[in-house]
Amino acid sequence: MTTRPDYALALHGGAGPKPGRDYSEVERHLSDLICEGEAMLKAGHSAVDTVEHMVRELEVSGLYVAGRGSAQNAAGFVETDAAIMDGAAMKAGSIAAVRNLVNPISGARAVMDKTPHIMIAGEGADRFCAERGLETVKDPANWYRLPVGVEEVETKTDELAHGTVGAVAMDKSGRLAAATSTGGLFGKRAGRVGDTPIIGAGTWADSGVAVSCTGLGEYFMLANAAYDIAAQMKYAKCPLGAAASNTLNAIAQYGGDGGLIAIDAEGTIVAPYNSHGMKCASVKAGEPAKVSVFSPN
């Protein structure tokens, strides 16, 4: 029987990077960030605090399709979604279709910690985040930027660019947590919400596994992807790797692609995808950090 590592952490910056483009800046950022997250877990920070911090940093970097890297919808303004789940406490929070929030993941955390609700959306979420004093974008025209690997022409085509960021962690106490944030699809219809803020579809954590998904959200919602992995593990006693593969296979059958990161209660980390690649990084106690874009992590 293997010994559970003291901690484990995985990050993703979205599935579907395009071969032939330069993602070295992303790789450097993920390398620095995974080391920062490892230091947090070594110092005794909780899994839920760690995943929130990791996603905040992914959001503000502007390198990914989330936070600063989000793009305008078809109506000409930015809407973002985010979710966080504390598996040990079985608590979750999410926000959807929120406008011009610097750190959407902290809006989701506030919903989890400060309200009896799980999801708040649209204008109600905007008002809630303002009441909580969360930082908003003061100058949208100069704040948002194209993420690494996305070209301007792609934001104006039918094959809309998309992306997500996420983190999953297991802390020293064995607690699991997951967090996910997205700017959604470039040029999406106003009010469109994908899988990211839907607890069980794009984000899930319980005592057995933590999952954050990335890809075209409609297909992940059809599969209820994040919870599907947990259910396979709980009811069919399926190992994490096999459960994740089964879920991605189902998504492919529906016509979708993407990837996910997950950690189980034994500290096993998986980061499978069925797209061209996935920007991801991982680390666990006693092992070196791994960063990859086009090869399995």
Image: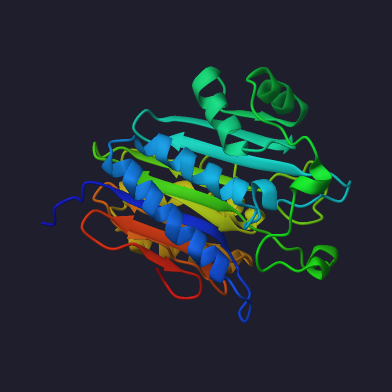
The quarter holding residue 206 reads top left
Q: Residue at x 56, y 62 (%)?
A: 251
Does residue 208 show up?
Answer: no
Q: Position of residue 144 (x, y in %)?
A: 75, 49
* Above or below for 149 versus 49: below
In the rendered view, how is the structure colored?
rainbow
* Above or below for 149 versus 218: below
The quarter holding residue 147 reads bottom right
**Is 10 on the left-hand or right-hand side of 258?**
left
**Is 275 on the left-hand or right-hand side of 96?**
left
Given residues 201 and 60, the one toward you in this image is 60
Given residues 109 and 233, the one toward you in this image is 109
Q: Position of residue 243 (x, y in %)?
A: 38, 59
Q: Quadrant of the C terminus?
A: bottom left
Q: Position of residue 191 (x, y in %)?
A: 79, 41
**Is 170 on the left-hand or right-hand side of 249?**
left
Given residues 200 and 150, the one toward you in this image is 150
Q: Residue at x 37, y 46 (%)?
A: 169
Most extreme residue toward the bottom, as rendered? 20
